[in-house]
Amino acid sequence: MRMREALVGVAALAAALSVPGPGGAAERGPVRIGLPVPLTGGAAQIGADMRNGFLMALEDEGGQAAGRRLEVLAEDDGGIPAQSLTKARKLVESDRVHVVAGVHLAPSCGAVAPYLNTKKIPYFFLCGNDDLTQRKPQEYLVRFSWNGTQPSHPFGEYAAKTLGYKRVATLGADYNFGWEVIGGFQRTFEENGGRIVQKLWFPLNTTDFGPYLSQLNRDVDAVYIFAFGALALRVARQYQDFGLKAKTPLIAGGPLTDESVLPQMGDEALGIVTALHYSAALDIPANKRFVRAYRAKYGKVPSQFSSDTYVIGLAIMEAIKAVDGDVENSPRFLAAAKRVRLPESPRGPVELDETANPINNVYIRKVERVGGELQNTVIYTYPRVSQFWKYNKEEYLRQPSYDRENPPCRFCQ
């Protein structure tokens, strides 16, 4: 799928507003941006939100930066790692893109990142694999989204200290990002006096959660779940259908009630507490403007994925301006991108640390019905959260990565 046509009107506007003289930016042609996103499969709504947020950011700036027209080439990678790599190769080798944005699922990012590094193509991914900016940093990655443990570390503390939970069971998607999200929560929850007493994992193709829900320990204060997309819809609904919601509070990683799926949920979502770096209900001027414009254009509220690619779009344009449109000099453009600061974005202030991972606010959200719609009401804010939380960076990196067995379940029964 190509999106050149989507920006034709925007490009015409940019041309009308900026007519450079001989040797100007227009003579270098457009800045070509590859956007591989999942537009089919279980993450199709996520991919659509990613595409919409990115295009909206560019359109808001007239479809140009530093006098150069911006051309977006979107490809459906289906959320499949091999397909993501194939699409990335096409964008780089056939379409000759200068920059790559998008890519959602952690396994896809793991497949594509090494290739883009060898080609020296700056890339702005949404995926949150911790080690892409930690133990195995990728030179050409600029991450303006989040990494898996960034919301989980503060949420583990919040669950223990504020919610007062002592015993929690976890249920998560069985792949590296799921391990990281749950691992980060477990570490800080237990450091603050809580105990994870059960850990269950389900495959990414799960449709029936009955076998997992029936195994859940009933003698717990809450169940913590990590799921996204179609998986989130199924597990939230089945958790209620099993009668669990009425007895045991459900808390979760932010994607469970993300706005990409929340409009399709009903009462099963009410009261679920999550942590994430964005909420469409975030009450700040930049987000109010963003939500209003997004609703008018797409007929729905933006999701985390919309806001992330919107922020990525803003950051790419700022970097293009900083190098006067010289994106062909990829090391120079990359260095400029890593220096971008966005003091006012829809999710609050965003800056990058020394590994090009964002320092974000993390919001504790609770699903409520307001004006007939479900929303993630922000009930607490952790400001300027680093990927290393409150830990010493060097000591943190000497510890093993979170995985299926780490942290170990010392209190499992």
Image (cartoon, rainbow, N blue to C red):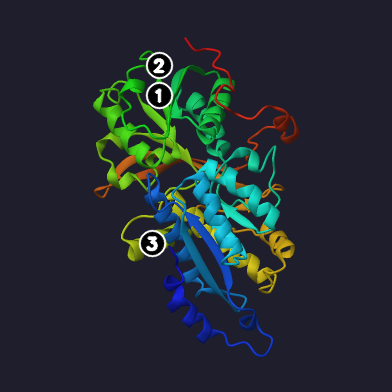
Pointer 3 or 1: first along the chain: 1
Which residue is more in the foreground, 214 or 303? Answer: 214
The residue depicted at 46 percent of the width and 65 percent of the height is 55
Q: Is residue 5 above or below residue 364?
A: below
Residue 102 appears anywhere in the view: no
The residue depicted at 44 percent of the width and 39 percent of the height is 254
Give the amino acid at mark 1: Val
Q: Are marks 1 and 2 in contact (CB under 8 Å)?
A: yes
Describe residue 263's horizontal placement relative to residue 302 as left or right: left
Q: Are marks 3 and 1 in contact (CB under 8 Å)?
A: no
Q: Which mark is residue 223?
A: 1
Relative image position of residue 309 (x, y in whole percent):
50, 56
Relative image position of residue 176 (x, y in whole percent):
54, 33
Residue 319 appears anywhere in the view: yes
Q: Residues within 10 Å of mark 3 (few under 14, many from 20)?
A: some
- Marks 1/2: CA distance? 7 Å
Pointer 3 or 2: first along the chain: 2
Residue marked by disc 3: 294
Relative image position of residue 303 (x, y in whole percent):
41, 51
Which picture quadrant has residue 76?
A: bottom left
What is the quadrant of the N terminus in the image?
bottom left
Give the amino acid at mark 3: Tyr
- Marks 3/1: CA distance? 33 Å
Give the amino acid at mark 2: Val
Describe residue 149's horizontal placement relative to residue 218 as left or right: right
Q: Residues within 10 Å of mark 1 (few under 14, many from 20)?
A: many
Residue marked by disc 2: 220
Secondary-structure class at tag 1: strand
Q: Is residue 157 above or below residue 11?
A: above
Relative image position of residue 102 (x, y in whole percent):
52, 54
